[in-house]
């Protein structure tokens, strides 16, 4: 689209306005309408590309700060709009054309990352829309699952090994072998996994999370609390954690509506000693309300997280969990860090994939672009993103850093909010959320 727009309004190599000289009034009338429609589409395309775009919350990872079914007005000017990496693509579509189920873009040419200066930078606590970093590779038939997690899990199953009695170099090699075995299995079983697809940065899925770690900070999670540079960060007001709730009877619908306990939140249950036990994500407000209702529940106890299976980085021996993670230093543009076999798994994807270097490990030594390396200077800023639905969010704890070139924009306001649990005549439109500013959601 961009090359055509450039020619139509700047270079003018193609005679787009030939119809104005036509002797046929019918041709001139029809083409004038076509011209007006094309101009409107171009205007919408430019607004979408450089200024604003619509985004709908597809999942519960940010609940109850942002809800599934919230439609957001996303500003690309807040952090600066990106020049498209993939200029030849179908306007106003994602990576796949509707109905045709084919790519909506041509991979060549690929432009280098550039960004127009925006109104500001990503700040601690901002809710941010970004391209999914691990979305560079997907298995077509199971795109809802992280490709790299699939490969590591399959590799571990097909090639089980013990890492306890081996040194760091051997351990790294074993992890790499597991991944290669898993990757080859996925590629050889196309009937089960589908074709393995690669996507440019700007053609990957859009995610929305809260930024909890900035470039240059050291982040750690202790008992579910995020610390940066040793200081505990304030938790979002509507943060949720999982609880096992033993029910005497099903929660009344009006109670669930008041405390925003969705049907999805109540979907996981089991029977224990004749009692119905449901695993539910709850805000502090909902937790306190349930604890105060012994007529409805017998107990409300903390439950295990369900956000993902393999903690980032996949190829590293660690005892980290979702609620006890790190510490990990977040890369900052221009800063140099020492590289070792022990910390390489944390940063190799940033060095190799996001910044385009050739990275190898040979005989226990690290080589970058053919040169032995004991340190590396980062070319981009990186961020740590997490969902407010902490125990049910697939976020940086599972796929790592978000590079600056993946940042799309900042949600400004909620212009529509629809609750999938209810009908149009029974609360589907959440009118109290209409035109709420996202910056007011802390």
Image: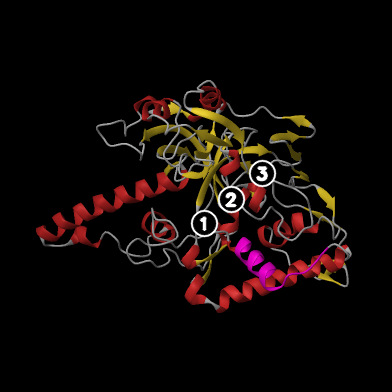
Q: Is residue 19 above or below residue 407?
A: below
Q: CA distance from mark 1 to mark 2?
A: 9 Å
User: Which residue does the image show at 31% across and 30% down from the upper left?
Assistant: 427
The residue carrying mark 3 is 383
The secondary structure type at the circle numbered 2 is helix
Crowd band around label 1 with a 10 angstrom C-alpha radius: few (<14), some (14–19), many (20+): many
Is residue 285 toward the left or the right of residue 221 in the image? left
Say whether residue 428 is left or right of residue 61. Answer: left
Compared to residue 329, the image places residue 315 above or below, namely: below
Q: Are marks 3 and 2 in contact (CB under 8 Å)?
A: no
Q: Position of residue 11 (x, y in %)?
A: 42, 59
Residue 150 is one of the magenta-drawn residues: yes
Which quarter shows the N terminus? bottom left
Question: Which image quarter is the C terminus in?
Answer: top right
Dot 1 lies on which element?
loop
User: Image quadrant of residue 357?
Assistant: bottom right
Q: Which residues are magenta?
A: 148-163
Q: Which residue is mark 2?
A: 406
Question: Percent from the top left, x then y, of residue 220?
Answer: 75, 39
Residue 204: mark: 1
Front residue of this view, candidates 367 and 157: 157
Label total for image? 3
Whichever of labels 3 and 2 marks the residue nearer the N terminus, that label is 3
Provide residue 422's location: percent of width, then percent of height.
Answer: 32, 36
Task: Examine the residues drawn in magenta and state their main secondary structure.
Answer: helix
CA gap, disc 1 and disc 3: 17 Å
Q: Can you name the residue that lies furthest to the front here?
A: 273
| Residue name at image x 24 percent, y 62 percent | 18
């Amino acid at each position: 689209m961009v090359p055509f727009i450039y020619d139509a309004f700047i270079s003018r190599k193609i005679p787009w306005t030939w119809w104005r000289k036509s002797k046929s009034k019918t041709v001139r009338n029809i083409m004038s309408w076509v011209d007006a429609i094309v101009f409107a589409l171009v205007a919408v395309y430019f607004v979408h590309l450089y200024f604003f775009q619509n985004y709908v919350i597809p999942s519960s990872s940010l609940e109850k700060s942002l809800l599934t079914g919230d439609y957001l007005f996303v500003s690309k000017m807040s952090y600066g709009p990106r020049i498209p990496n993939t200029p030849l693509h179908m306007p106003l579509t994602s990576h796949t054309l509707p109905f045709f189920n084919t790519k909506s873009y041509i991979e060549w040419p690929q432009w280098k990352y550039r960004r127009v200066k925006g109104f500001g930078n990503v700040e601690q606590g901002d809710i941010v829309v970004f391209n999914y970093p691990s979305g560079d590779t997907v298995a077509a038939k199971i795109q809802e699952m992280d490709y790299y997690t699939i490969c590591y899990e399959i590799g571990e199953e097909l090639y089980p090994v013990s890492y306890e009695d081996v040194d760091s170099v051997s351990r790294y090699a074993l992890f790499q072998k597991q991944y290669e075995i898993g990757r080859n299995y996925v590629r050889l079983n196309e009937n089960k996994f589908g074709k393995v697809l690669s996507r440019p940065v700007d053609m990957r899925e859009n995610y929305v999370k809260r930024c909890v770690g900035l470039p240059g900070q050291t982040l750690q999670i202790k008992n579910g609390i995020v610390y940066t540079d040793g200081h505990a960060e304030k938790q979002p007001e509507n943060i949720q954690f999982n609880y096992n709730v033993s029910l005497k009877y099903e929660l009344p619908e009006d109670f669930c509506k008041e405390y925003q306990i969705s049907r999805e939140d109540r979907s996981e249950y089991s029977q224990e000693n004749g009692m119905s036990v449901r695993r539910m994500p709850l805000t502090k407000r909902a937790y306190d309300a349930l604890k105060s209702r012994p007529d409805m529940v017998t107990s409300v106890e903390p439950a295990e997280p369900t956000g993902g299976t393999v903690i980032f980085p996949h190829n590293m021996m660690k005892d980290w969990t979702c609620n006890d993670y790190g510490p990990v230093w977040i890369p900052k543009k221009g800063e140099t860090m020492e590289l070792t076999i022990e910390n390489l798994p944390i940063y190799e994807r940033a060095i190799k994939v996001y910044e385009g270097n050739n990275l190898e490990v040979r005989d226990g030594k690290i080589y970058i672009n053919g040169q032995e390396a004991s340190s590396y200077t980062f070319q981009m800023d990186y961020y740590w993103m997490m969902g407010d639905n902490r125990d049910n969010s697939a976020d940086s704890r599972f796929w790592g850093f978000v590079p600056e070139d993946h940042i799309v924009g900042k949600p400004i306001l909620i212009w529509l909010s629809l609750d999938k649990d209810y009908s149009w005549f029974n609360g589907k439109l959440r009118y109290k959320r209409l035109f709420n500013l996202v910056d007011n959601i802390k």
